[in-house]
């Protein structure tokens, strides 16, 4: 499954990244990190998006320093909705 990640930039123009799941997000440039966010508040390996057994998109924190927020709530793991 492919999903879109939309990031707001300081210029106001959104940047769209399309990625196939699973996706690991982090600050470092490595083969494990498929979507890099070069910001200090993002851990080297911050979180991952994946499909559960039922086909629902989930996010899981990977022990990041600042945590992963889902709809403004800090989660270790959570389910996304359309």
Image (cartoon, rainbow, N blue to C red):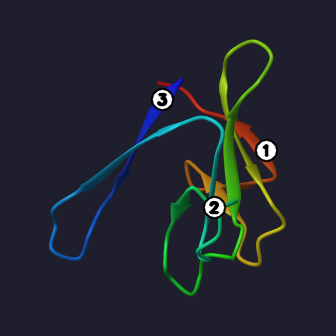
* Picture quadrant where residue 73 is located: bottom right
Q: In the image as oriented, which residue stretches furthest toward the top?
A: 54
Sort mark 1 into few (<14), some (14-19) or many (20+) by Cα contacts within 10 Å.
Answer: some
- Depth check: give the residue in front, 30 or 46: 30
Drawn side of residue 76 relative to residue 33, left or right: right
| Crowd class of label 2 (few under 14; some 14 to 19; many from 20; radius 10 Å) | some
Which residue matches tag 2? 33
**Residue positioned 49% across, 71% down in the render:** 37
16 to the left or right of 63: left
User: Crowding near pointer 3: few (<14 within 10 Å), some, many (20+)?
Assistant: few
Residue occupying the point 58% across, 74% down: 29
Query: Which residue carries the number 1 mark?
Result: 77
Image quarter of residue 7:
bottom left
Q: Position of residue 71 (x, y in %)?
A: 55, 48
Instruction: For mark 3, give the secondary structure.
Output: strand
For marks 3 and 1, the one nearer the N-term is: 3
- Residue identifier under label 3: 2
Q: Residue at x 66, y 21 (%)?
A: 56
Quadrant where the N terminus lies?
top right
């Amino acid at each position: 499954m492919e999903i879109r990640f939309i990031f707001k930039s300081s210029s106001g123009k959104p940047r769209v990244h399309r990625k196939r799941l699973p996706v690991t997000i982090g600050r470092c440039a490595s083969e494990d990190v498929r979507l890099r966010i070069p910001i200090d508040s993002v851990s080297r390996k911050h979180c991952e998006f994946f499909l559960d057994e039922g086909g629902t998109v989930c996010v899981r924190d990977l022990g990041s320093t600042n945590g992963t927020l889902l709809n403004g709530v800090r989660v270790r793991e959570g389910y996304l909705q359309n």
